[in-house]
Amino acid sequence: MINKIFESLQSAVADVHDGATVMIGGFGTAGMPSELIDALIEQGARDLTIVNNNAGNGDIGLAALLKAKRVRKIICSFPRQSDSYVFDALYRAGEIELELVPQGNLAERIRAAGAGIGGFFTPTGYGTKLAEGKETRLIDGRHYVLESPLHADFALVKAYKGDRWGNLTYRKTARNFGPIMASAAKTAIVQVSEVVPLGGLDPEVIVTPGIFVQRVIEVPQAAHAPTPNPHDAAA
Amino acid sequence: MKKLTRDEMAKRVALDIPEGAYVNLGIGVPTLVANHLAADKEIFLHSENGLLGMGPAPAKGEEDDELINAGKQHVTLLTGGAYFHHADSFAMMRGGHLDFCVLGAFQVSAKGDLANWHTGAPDAIPAVGGAMDLAIGAKQVYVMMEHLTKQGESKIAAECSYPVTGVGCVDRIYTDLAMIDVTDQGLVVREIFSDIDFDALHKLTGVPLIDGTQGARAA
């Protein structure tokens, strides 16, 4: 019997090694797998390269990981936010390396890695500082920039429901980078609000099929909004 | 000199967005446009963090931290709306499926180059988000900005002095003084919102403008 369910957050992140590249889902705090990140902080891996859209908010989750000085480099699109003071201080002190990537290129580079694509030409960023030094090509009258896939050793993802084969659904805009990060990492570690029995997810609405997922941990979440999404009942 | 307020600019932009359009409103002033879209028109608002059919802010107490827009503000989803992941969301942009995006700007060049992501200040922490994707990511890219800086310099310039977000990507500029189309012939003024005439606007702007107003005056 195949069972990808892990019983503890600690066991799920136990083998994250020093120097690993770790993708972390979330857009701001929506979809951020905070409990998995806390487990990673406790586990102690350092010298990490982190891939996330942002660079942490306040003192929790990704910001806490940065604050613990476990991150050598961050690859993201929007580090500077009103509450990104942990990153800001590290960056100004020269204690963290930043690779800034336009958001759609970040998403497509992650998707490309999961899809086995060796590179792609995108119009985004052409003629800008963020494309300096990159190969360009004129295709059908439009300028494109060559971008490379972005692989990871691990992905930490927050989903809504999952089963023991790793099939997943997500909740609202917390989906964001989860599905593509799961596919781009050698080991996708997913915290779900609820583990359901096999067959408990309608196959027509599974967003991430279990082939992309190696580990699932149930982390119940505090009650969500007072107005439940009617579609959740079907998922 | 009469100038449109930001809200009046938003109202003017909203007039040009037809029913059925798929639209992304950039962070900041462009989000005001949503307040002026006619209630009897079905217009699909896209937010790049993964939703289509974005509705207004929720009532107090009904905020959901997992239902936010690209500015990380709480929003709602209209009946018929959909959620999707980031790669699909940017495929909607890059793939030319969005009809309009409306963006704020520091500067627009006479050739339609856009600068809105970085002031170029050496000590600034750079952040780009979806700005470069949006700049090239719709059939029509509209910019909404004040015509002049606080120092009185034109934000429409021969060349952008700030780092560019996209090259030749802007189709139309709405300022607090005028609506200007970026065309192969040059910048064509379609409407003047102020009490100044074309020649005065031309002088303020400081780059070649073509008078396409045919006397049109929104005032």
Image: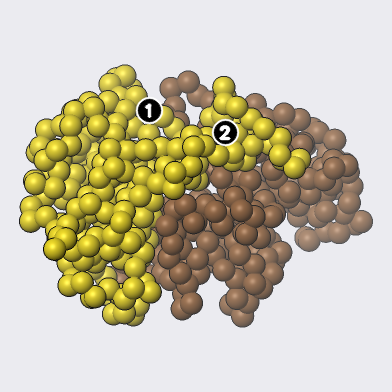
Chain colours: A yellow, B brown
Mark 1, chain letter? A
Disc 2 residue crowd, few under 14, some 14–19, many 20+, Cα 10 Å: some
1 or 2: tag closer to the N-terminus? 1
Residue drawn at point x = 31 percent, y = 53 percent: A212
Residue B80 falls left or right of residue A159: right
Q: Which label sits in the foreground, 1 or 2?
A: 2
Question: Label 1 vs label 2: CA separation?
Answer: 20 Å
Q: Position of residue B112 (x, y in %)?
A: 73, 40
Instruction: Say which of B23 and B211 sits in front.
Output: B23
Q: Which residue is mark 2?
A: A146
Q: Position of residue A175 (x, y in %)?
A: 35, 59
Q: Give the numbered dot on residue B192.
A: none
Q: Which residue is mark 1?
A: A98
Mark 2, chain letter? A
Residue drawn at point x = 65 percent, y = 64 percent: B14
Is residue B55 visible from the viewing direction of this image? Answer: no
Q: Secondary structure at mark 2?
A: strand
Residue drawn at point x = 56 percent, y = 45 percent: B133
Residue A21 falls left or right of residue A196: right
Q: Is residue A119 above or below residue B87?
A: above
Q: Quadrant of residue B5?
A: bottom right
Q: Position of residue B49 (x, y in %)?
A: 43, 55
